[in-house]
Image: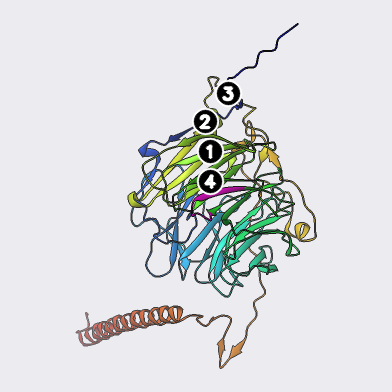
Amino acid sequence: MTVTKMSWRPQYRSSKFRNVYGKVANREHCFDGIPITKNVHDNHFCAVNARFLAIVTESAGGGSFLVIPLEQTGRIEPNYPKVCGHQGNVLDIKWNPFIDNIIASCSEDTSVRIWEIPEGGLKRNMTEALLELHGHSRRVGLVEWHPTTNNILFSAGYDYKVLIWNLDVGEPVKMIDCHTDVILCMSFNTDGSLLTTTCKDKKLRVIEPRSGRVLQEANCKNHRVNRVVFLGNMKRLLTTGVSRWNTRQIALWDQEDLSMPLIEEEIDGLSGLLFPFYDADTHMLYLAGKGDGNIRYYEISTEKPYLSYLMEFRSPAPQKGLGVMPKHGLDVSACEVFRFYKLVTLKGLIEPISMIVPRRSDSYQEDIYPMTPGTEPALTPDEWLGGINRDPVLMSLKEGYKKSSKVVFKAPIREKKSVVVNGIDLLENVPPRTENELLRMFFRQQDEIRRLKEELAQKDIRIRQLQLELKNLRNSPKNC
């Protein structure tokens, strides 16, 4: 008779990401001397891609942001050129995923703007946007690019509406009008066929974006949702929020049934907003609290317990927000699987933090770098608006991560119309929409009048000098 002995050792999950650690860049590889915005809006105020880092800055009169080439680390001069065309504070910025020098921004001035950053970065202040998009009646808090379609942009305003812009024509083509309060967060599934939102009305929604139809809705009374993220193709959502006891909490949901969360897990009793970041390639979830110095990370699976805690990156410096490098911008030779750009407001510092899988081998680690969404769009705006869904065009990081995208942004050429009233073209001279704009226009005109008066006075002096010289020439005796 054989006796089976039971092992009382705890069962550890075998995971290749169990020893992932965070490595802070050396001081000379950080970005220093940046006047990071003091705005209290709950956004990251930072966007990064394989070429540029963009940061919303503190500025008087209107809103602005810096765009710095990634190789230009170290101290940034106070007079470094800015993108400064908005009349109100900039609330969100996002790089186009397919064209790495095109960035979208939205602002308190109710507009969304598209900017084209010149090769090598800015040499002077940029005030003229490639496109100005007006459609919201109140300030615009969020912008998101569609993950698989070129030139489709989503914007969410304080008018409780989500507008879908087709940048090929420079117009809003759809409006999602199902929210009853301010939209806090937007996230897409992998192919962009579904949009999930969190809202101040305490509801979590899954929406079909083209029709605006709400497919699923959760009324979160016990778990007040703040942020949401689609977990790749797992058909799961993860939300961060606050429990009924005012503790920070995360919840995992089935996207096809939001009646109850699959799990809820309390994190801690701190008050800062929890930002979730999901890496579909490694199935890792990162949680970073606003005002915290630490970043927790977990591994997500489709079977129970669904969420496995891995480790925590600790730092004494509190973060205001975090930018995330796209996969094709990572250093695969260092086994880097994720990279944050941490905003440290008190020091005016942007600090890169690399999440690294420790490996002894120097060769390309295929198991931690599967094929990943690349820089080529899968659809045109007309295809997507016509109802086609397509998965992202994948690329290998082994050969393809240095390739530049072939996509070029072309601003739509609009026919020039004119509406002339009393000899003034109203479309050429757009009237100010707010009292601040009126004041700014008034002071601008006062400066212009002052400059023209000075120019006129200088020309008067020059005319008098020339008249005197002419008189002298006439009166002088002729040389024989």
Residue 128 magenta-highlighted: no
The colour scheme of the drawn protein is rainbow
Q: Are marks 1 and 2 in contact (CB under 8 Å)?
A: yes
Which element is circle 4 on? strand
Q: Which residue is mark 4?
A: 266
User: In this figure, which residue is indicated by the disc labeled 2?
Assistant: 20
Where residue 363 appears, as percent x and y from the top left, is 58, 22
Task: Please state the horizontal and vertical placement of residue 272, each as a whole percent of the image.
Answer: 45, 53
Chain-order first, disc 3 or disc 2: 3
Above or below, 448 against 119 in this view is below
**Nearer the observer, disc 4 or disc 2?**
4
User: Where residue 439 appears, x then y in whole percent?
Assistant: 41, 81
Classed neighbour count for the residue bearing mark 1: other residues with Cα under 10 Å, few (<14), some (14–19), many (≥20): many
- Within 10 angstroms of label 4, few (less than 14), some, or many (20 or more) residues? some
Whether tag 3 and tag 2 are in contact, CB under 8 A, the answer is no
Stretch of the chain drawn in magenta: 243-251
